[in-house]
Image (cartoon, helix red, strand yellow):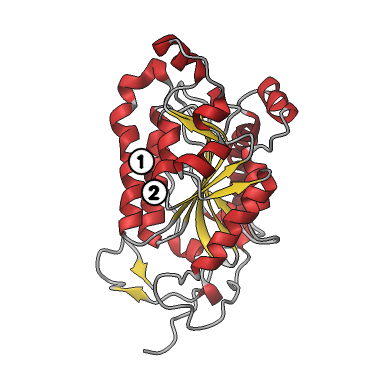
Amino acid sequence: MSEASVIQSRIDTTSDDYKQNLAEMQALWNEVAEEMAKVPGIGGQRYVDRHRSRGKMLVRERVEALIDPNTALLELSPLAGWGTQDPIGVGTFNGIGVIEGVECGIAGSDMTVRGGAGNPTTWNKQKRFFEIVRENRLPLILLNESAGADLPRQADIFVYGGEQFRDITQLSKMGIPSICVAFGPNTAGGAYIPGMSDYTVFVKERGTAYLGGPPLVKMAINEDVDEETLGGAEMHSRTSGLSDYLAMDEMDGLRIARQIVRHLEWKKLGPGPTAPADDPLYDPAELLGCAMANVRIPFDIKEIHARILDGSRFEEFKPLYGEKLVCGW
């Protein structure tokens, strides 16, 4: 087959109609950007300050330190929970980043949002994330520090929360590795994550894993026990064997996670690119003005294709049949 046809754009980017539509779409996008900007601090400055006072990094700082320098990071479902009673982002980070040259799925709990406890929307967000990881065969990195489930809403959580634990085991069965770094307390459902991961890293004097903490032990059997003895990093590294690696601090834990990825010698699913990528012939910055701000007004989808496809090349499939749906490669 000969090379695909080049799309010829019919949009006049100097026209008044285009400029008006661009301005309207930019205003809408600014609203989205404002919501996105709220996510990193959605837990509130008080809890951010408390987290930092304990010498801990925020979840997005951990992610940035984990991935290769100067590489792209794609956050997934950042506005999950918008329009619901749950906080925007629902207390988790999900995304795809490059670690030791390998594209990986990265999930991290945000301890500043209800102690990293999950709500019903959290599990919906995680479910979609695990689908993407599974379908694309991405090594999974779990940056864990969680209080488990948001107990006041447990009736809406437990069944769906269990799906996440099942998904981790299914990934392992498929040969897709999971690597968990325990940065702090991992209680109840949060403790299952390191237990089910293929590789676990615990941060010394910080990472813990237990179904119930010392106060619950005291209440249940009237026994006094400290966190380290009950489920600390040293105990799990030397006694229970839950921890595969003992990290000296958070940065060391991230270093070990990168080292594990490097040793995987992971090969991406499917063949690699057959040709080097080239830029579209039309500026992607024009995209906002191509789609109509008024959803009742149709627009030519090929104008979008022309600004995202390599060389603006597109071979349409069945161009004369079902013209309302554009398909091709």
Report the residue at 66% width, 43% height from top: 250
Amino acid, disc 1: Gln
Q: Quadrant of residue 57?
A: top right
Name above or below for residue 257 compared with residue 109. Answer: below
Q: Residues within 10 Å of mark 1 (few under 14, many from 20)?
A: some
Q: Is residue 306 left or right of residue 161?
A: right
Q: Residues within 10 Å of mark 2 (few under 14, many from 20)?
A: many
Say the numbered circle drawn on residue 301: none
- Give the number of marks: 2
The nearer-to-camera label among 1 and 2 is 1
Residue 307 visible to an observer of this rendering = no
Residue 280: image location, x then y, percent:
58, 71
Report the residue at 65% width, 55% height from top: 255
* 154 or 187, nearer to the observer: 187
Name above or below for residue 114 compared with residue 286. Answer: above
Q: Is residue 51 left or right of residue 137?
A: right
Report the residue at 34% width, 27% height from top: 157
Badge 1 marks a residue whose secondary structure is: helix
Q: Residue furthest toward the bottom?
A: 2
Between the C-alphas of marks 1 and 2, the distance is 8 Å
Report the residue at 47% width, 78% height from top: 272
Identify the image quadrant of the N terminus: bottom left
Residue 245: image location, x then y, percent:
56, 50
Q: Tell me the residue that label 2 is attached to.
A: 130
* Label 1 with label 2: CB-CB less than 8 Å: yes
Residue 23: image location, x then y, percent:
64, 44
Badge 2 marks a residue whose secondary structure is: helix
Q: Quadrant of residue 149?
A: top left
Q: Tell me the residue that label 1 is attached to.
A: 164
* 266 or 285, nearer to the observer: 266
* 163 or 301, nearer to the observer: 163
Answer with mark 1 or mark 2, whichever residue precedes in sequence: 2
